[in-house]
Image: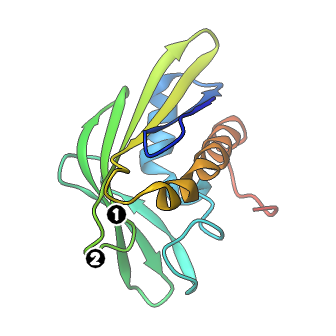
Amino acid sequence: MTKEGGVGPILESAFVPADPDAVYAAFTEQIGAWWPIGTHSVTGVPVEGLELEPHAGGRLVEVWADGTRAPWAEVVEATAPSRLSLRWNPGGGPRPATTVDVAFTPIAGGTQVRVTHSGWEPLGEEARMDYVAGWPFVLDRLALHVSRPGPRADW
């Protein structure tokens, strides 16, 4: 794993023991099953999950128990099974969006998932630091989900 200091991009990667098609599908179609929504959500309201529309112009939204849909990101590019690019702005609002690029690269025995989270310059180091520890945790959850699919009582 690599973490660059300052307001440069956050670079994180993880090995996932499955082929890129399965990992891409888990990331896009099953994000609500593995994303750590209890600790990584927009607000503290009861959250039902996440939904991602994996096509250019699609959205990533947090779905609340009352049916409210809070925006997280807009899909800039979705090239299955190799790349997903998002204009990232959880909660929407006037705050400048960042860019999250996710690459799914086949390697021996599975897939390397690499996240490049950039565009921190207008937001500063403090905003960036919220994500430095977050991405490794999120990618670990993805890897665990793919290697052991199904509901988790311990999540």
Mark number for residue 93? Answer: 2
| Farthest left residue in view | 57
Q: Position of residue 137 (x, y in %)?
A: 67, 48
Residue placed at 47% from the left, 36% from the top? 115
Amino acid type, residue under disc 2 in the picture: Gly
For the residues labelled 2 and 1, say whether their Cβ atoms are less than 8 Å apart. yes
The N terminus appears in which quarter of the rendering?
top right
Read off the residue under disc 1.
89
* Position in image of residue 40 (x %, y %): 58, 65
Q: Is residue 87 left or right of residue 107?
A: left
Q: How many marks?
A: 2
Q: Is residue 86 left or right of residue 21?
A: left
Q: Crowdedness of circle 1 by 10 Å Cα count: few (<14), some, many (20+)?
A: many
Q: Residue furthest bottom?
A: 66
Does residue 55 appear left or right of residue 140 in this picture?
Answer: left
The residue drawn where x is 28% and y is 76% is 93
Q: Quadrant of the C terminus?
A: bottom right
Q: In the rendered view, would you say 38 is above or below 76?
A: below
- On the image, the x and y values in percent for residue 44 come to 58, 84
Based on the displayed image, in which of its 4 quarters is residue 111 positioned?
top right
Q: Quadrant of residue 35?
A: bottom right
Residue 134's place in the image compared with 81, above or below, is below
